[in-house]
Image (cartoon, rainbow, N blue to C red):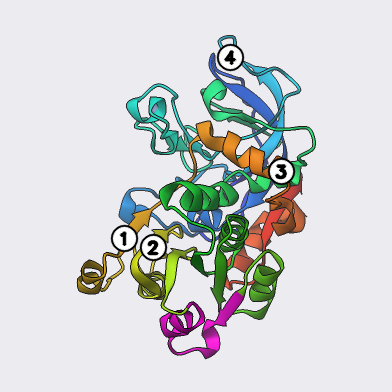
């Protein structure tokens, strides 16, 4: 089968013919119909992450936001059958450790990330293997398209988990979103659906306009604003209740923390670049003084997808509205290179394999 393989950091992925996977006893093989291209792929492609012992190995098949159709089923799989339409969370759990059984499979003790580890080749390929598939694969309603399903693989569920589970967003709260790439736009849409007013922050016109289309009530153009936290404090009459760094740079992380009102919650979603190497200095005395909380958040437990699916079925969320571009497997390298220049907008999805 065809797959896009990481041959050297920062160099074009090579389209190779590799063996199609066979399902292990608890796994399924999914024919990939769509797979999002995400900034996490870009981090992998750039070779980031060695500072957290998280560098993707050379030879990896990238791609971690797949949606598709179950093709082959392992003999111990109980709940899935060929033909089932599924999305696959990138945060694969074993379904049996103390975190998984208590509902926190996104931080499984034995978990690993699809498309980032040698043991879990990714979905920039015609087919992808899903381990512990009864636990990890999420069956989806017939009326959700594959492109929408791909948007559910990582960025959209990460935004939903952050805002619906990690912090408590109430109707009427102000939520600030720093960085309006695919993840940030998903956060804007989810926060708006939860009843919050949303301030979207970016340095580019198109993503800010996109943010307004999906629910932002206010925007701050950080390219011509010296004091972003001050601008947010003014717009929200005292600061955001919840603020998200959806980009992962020192400036956006710090701006996010500083744009909170007393007792506010910051949620870190963006991973840092090689400029920060996982470290950002923060005003911890002020955070202490004002009861400000800092949360990390990653993915979403597969066992909580039903909440998201109900909001989709009720028509209150529309991840398909974030899909801005459909590309072929050969185009992935170009789209990753475009991310280096922050020259993408919305969620781009591979639909031709
Ligand atoms: Zn587990
Ligand atoms: Zn992703």
Q: Is residue 303 magenta?
A: no
Q: CA distance from mark 3 to mark 1?
A: 32 Å
Q: Nearer the viewer, residue 212 or 135?
A: 212
Task: Give the residues in magenta.
Answer: 218-236
Q: CA distance from mark 2 to mark 3?
A: 28 Å
**Numbered marks: total:** 4
Q: CA distance from mark 3 to mark 4?
A: 30 Å
| Front: mark 3 or 1 | 3
Q: Position of residue 281 (x, y in %)?
A: 27, 71
Query: Compared to 298, does 240 lie above or below?
Result: below
Write down the residue under mark 3.
314
Write down the residue under mark 2.
266
The mark that comes first in sequence, 2 or 1, is: 2
Q: Secondary structure at mark 3?
A: loop
Q: Secondary structure at mark 2?
A: strand
User: In the rendered image, which quarter contains the N terminus?
Assistant: top right
Q: CA distance from mark 4 to mark 1?
A: 41 Å
Mark 2 residue crowding within 10 angstroms, few (<14) / some (14–19) / many (20+): many
The residue at the point 64 percent across, 33 percent down is: 18
Image-based side of 36 in relation to 55, left or right: right
The reply to whether dot 2 and dot 1 touch (C-beta < 8 Å) is yes
Write down the residue under mark 4.
77
The mark that comes first in sequence, 4 or 1, is: 4
Image-based side of 153 in relation to 296, left or right: right
Write down the residue under mark 1.
293
Q: Nearer the viewer, residue 166 or 134?
A: 166
**Residue 333 position by quadrant:** bottom right
Most distant residue in the top direction = 75
Mark 1 residue crowding within 10 angstroms, few (<14) / some (14–19) / many (20+): some
């Amino acid at each position: 089968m065809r797959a896009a393989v990481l041959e050297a950091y920062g160099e074009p992925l090579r389209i190779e013919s590799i063996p199609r996977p066979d399902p292990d006893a608890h796994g399924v093989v999914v024919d990939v119909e769509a797979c999002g291209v995400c900034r996490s792929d870009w981090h992998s492609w750039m070779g980031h992450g060695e500072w957290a012992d998280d560098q993707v190995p050379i030879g990896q098949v990238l791609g971690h936001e797949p949606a598709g159709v179950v093709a082959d089923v392992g003999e111990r799989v109980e709940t899935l059958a060929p033909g089932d339409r599924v999305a696959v969370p990138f945060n694969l759990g074993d379904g049996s450790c103390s975190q998984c059984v208590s509902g926190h499979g996104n931080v499984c003790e034995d978990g690993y990330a699809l498309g980032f580890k040698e043991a879990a080749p990714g979905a920039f390929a015609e087919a992808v293997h899903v381990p512990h598939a009864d636990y990890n694969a999420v069956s989806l309603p017939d009326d959700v398209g594959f492109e929408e399903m791909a948007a559910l693989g990582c960025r959209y569920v990460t935004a939903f988990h952050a805002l619906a589970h990690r912090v408590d967003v109430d109707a009427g709260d102000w939520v600030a979103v720093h960085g309006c790439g695919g993840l940030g736009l998903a956060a804007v849409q989810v926060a708006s659906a939860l009843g919050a007013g949303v301030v979207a922050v970016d340095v580019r016109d198109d993503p800010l306009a996109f943010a307004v289309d999906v629910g932002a009530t206010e925007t701050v153009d950080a390219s011509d604003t010296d004091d972003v936290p001050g601008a947010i404090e003014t717009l929200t009459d005292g600061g955001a209740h919840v603020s998200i760094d959806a980009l992962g740079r020192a400036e956006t992380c710090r701006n996010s923390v500083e744009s909170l009102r007393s007792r506010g919650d910051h949620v870190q979603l963006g991973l840092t670049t090689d400029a920060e190497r996982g470290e950002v200095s923060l005003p911890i005395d002020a955070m202490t003084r004002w009861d400000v909380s800092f949360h990390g958040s990653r993915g979403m437990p597969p066992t909580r997808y039903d909440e998201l699916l109900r909001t989709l079925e009720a028509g209150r969320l529309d991840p398909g509205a974030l899909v801005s571009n459909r590309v072929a497997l050969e185009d992935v390298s170009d789209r990753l290179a475009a991310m280096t220049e922050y020259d993408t907008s919305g969620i781009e999805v591979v639909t031709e394999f």
